[in-house]
Image (cartoon, helix red, strand yellow):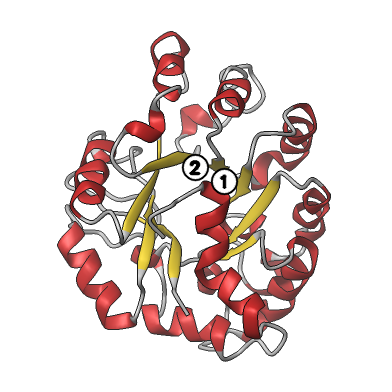
Amino acid sequence: MRIIDAQVHIWGSGTPSGDHRQVSAFTVDELLAEMDEAGVDAAVLHPPVSWDLDANALCEAAAALHPQRLCILGQVPLDQPATSRPLLATWRERPGQCGLRYPLVRADQQTWPFDGTMDWLWPAAEDAGLPVATLAWRFLPELTRIAERHPNLRLIIDHCGVKRGGKGADAFAEVDAACALARFPNVALKATGAPCHSLLPYPFRDIHDGLHRLYDAFGPDRFFWGTDITRMPCSWRQCITLFTEELPWLQGPQMERVMGQGIADWIGWRAA
């Protein structure tokens, strides 16, 4: 089984946000060494532009060196549509770029899904055939409208679609809102960062039910394993075995889809 992590970061400067490792740099060589140790075959880089403005270029350089192991969901500035929109037409010609991803964690970005700042992105990405991932728990109703208006735009809900910082059963208290979006065939979900939401030690049994509900809603082709490893409270290997050994409802060919091939197909990563 080929294991592909749906979300990892590398960076070369800045102060990492949230619970990420508080180091000034995390290099591609360090990432690949940890992947090798854990048995991760490939990964999708998410440039952490919120703290390293050069992260896009850093990730493209890494993907150019390791095209069989790394691809990217990158960024163009959302508040500069005149210069950003033309980039999307040839985005896949850049090293490793398979789509776009916006966490929207900065204070000045909180209103962007609602105030028109992002309105240009959805049709432009749809026309360019670029999937867009986003940390959407704050604006799931708006994402519903986006999915309806742009049926050929592949959307990805980040981090299980649950409240950032939520813990235990409380983290998944509103999971039905994320599950409801599964009715749109152009919406998928990354089950990334799951261990962060647990109040228990491995195997994090207080989040199993929430994961099961999301899997039942989205199915193996639209439910993607991943870690966001630089903020995990456990080892990369435990992030893997949580899904491959501790969830009895995830077996066989469905497990293979969840653990890697599903995300590769969704974003059109041919090297995988």
The answer to which quarter of the image holds residue 243 is bottom right
Q: Residue at x 50, y 67 (%)?
A: 260
Q: Secondary structure at mark 1?
A: loop
Where in the figure is residue 96, as x and y percent of width and height?
A: 33, 44
Whether tag 1 and tag 2 are in contact, CB under 8 A, the answer is yes
The answer to which quarter of the image holds residue 126 is top right
Which amino acid type is marked by label 2? Pro
User: From the viewer's perspective, is residue 15 above or below residue 202?
Assistant: above
User: Quick check: 4 left or right of 12?
Assistant: right
Looking at this view, is 270 or 245 the one in front? 270
User: From the viewer's perspective, is residue 188 above or below residue 29?
Assistant: above
What is the quadrant of the C terminus in the image? bottom left
State how far apart marks 1 and 2 are (Cα): 5 Å
**Residue 174 seen by the camera:** yes
Q: Earlier in the sequence, mark 1 or mark 2?
A: 2
Where in the figure is residue 145, as x and y percent of width and height?
A: 78, 31
- Provide the residue designation for mark 1: 135
- Provide the residue designation for mark 2: 103
